[in-house]
Image (cartoon, rainbow, N blue to C red):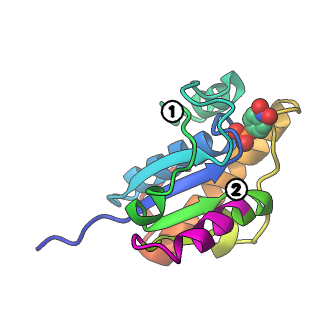
């Protein structure tokens, strides 16, 4: 039987800046490296549910020739059994995710996802929220997403030769 492909949910606060960019970059890097994974993203807050990504997120991805298509969603309990990895953009979102995971641990549908910082396999730094700043914050976010995607894939799969990013 074929091994099921790894599934990853990238999480930030609003799901319009950092995590849809993380989703797009991880999916793109994995595709270039010939790695079959399922990637999605969500926010710990629901302010922007159903919104498309922030135009600065889209512009930054387009500049780097990374396709992006997403509608914002909020994290739900079923994500904790649906995904192998739930990767937080920063420590505030990691704390919020671990609170949900702890609560679910006493329930019949126990959480199976590994909840970690996206940067866990690299420098362990948070991705700062670029929402209230300029385009430089989005470029920094993109560079971090690229770096953390490679480090994550190195850890779970290996072979980064094929990517141009
Ligand atoms: P994100 O950025 O968490 O990277 O999507 C934000 C987007 C919107 C808001 C905060 C952060 N907001 O407060 O509306």
Give the numbered dot on residue 52.
Answer: none
> Percent from the top left, x then y, of residue 53?
61, 28
Q: Main secondary structure of the magenta part?
A: helix
- Reading the image, the residue beneath label 1 is 68
Sort mark 1 into few (<14), some (14-19) or many (20+) by Cα contacts within 10 Å: many
Q: Cβ of disc 2 within 8 Å of ligand 1?
A: yes
- Reading the image, the residue beneath label 2 is 89
Q: Quadrant of residue 61?
A: top right
If the image is split into quadrants, where does the N terminus sit?
bottom left
At 69% from the left and 32% from the top, the residue drawn is 47
Can the viewer see residue 117 in this picture?
A: no
Which one is nearer the viewer's eye here, 92 or 110? 110
At 75% from the left and 71% from the top, the residue drawn is 124
Report if residue 142 lies within the magenta region: no
- Please state if 163 lies on the left or on the right of 94 as rendered: left
Mark 1 vs 2, N-terminal side? 1
> Percent from the top left, x then y, of residue 153?
48, 67
Sort mark 2 into few (<14), some (14-19) or many (20+) by Cα contacts within 10 Å: many
| Magenta-tinted stretch | 96-109
Q: In the displayed orientation, state which residue is furthest to the left.
A: 1
- Please state if 57 lies on the left or on the right of 20 as rendered: right
């Amino acid at each position: 039987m074929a091994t099921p492909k790894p599934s990853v949910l990238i999480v930030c606060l609003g799901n319009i800046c950092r995590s849809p960019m993380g989703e797009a970059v991880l999916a793109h890097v994995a595709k270039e490296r010939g790695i079959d994974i399922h990637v999605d993203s969500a926010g710990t807050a629901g302010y922007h549910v159903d919104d498309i990504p922030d135009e600065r997120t889209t512009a930054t991805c387009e500049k780097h020739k990374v396709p992006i298509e997403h509608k914002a969603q909020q994290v739900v309990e079923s994500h904790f059994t649906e995904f192998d990895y739930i990767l937080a953009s920063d420590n505030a979102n990691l704390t919020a995710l671990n609170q949900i995971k702890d609560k679910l641990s006493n329930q019949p549908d126990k959480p199976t996802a590994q909840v970690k910082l996206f940067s866990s396999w690299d420098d362990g730094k948070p991705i700062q929220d670029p929402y209230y700043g300029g385009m430089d914050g989005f470029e920094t976010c993109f560079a971090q997403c690229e770096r953390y995607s490679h480090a994550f894939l190195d850890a779970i799969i290996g072979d980064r030769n094929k990517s141009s990013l």
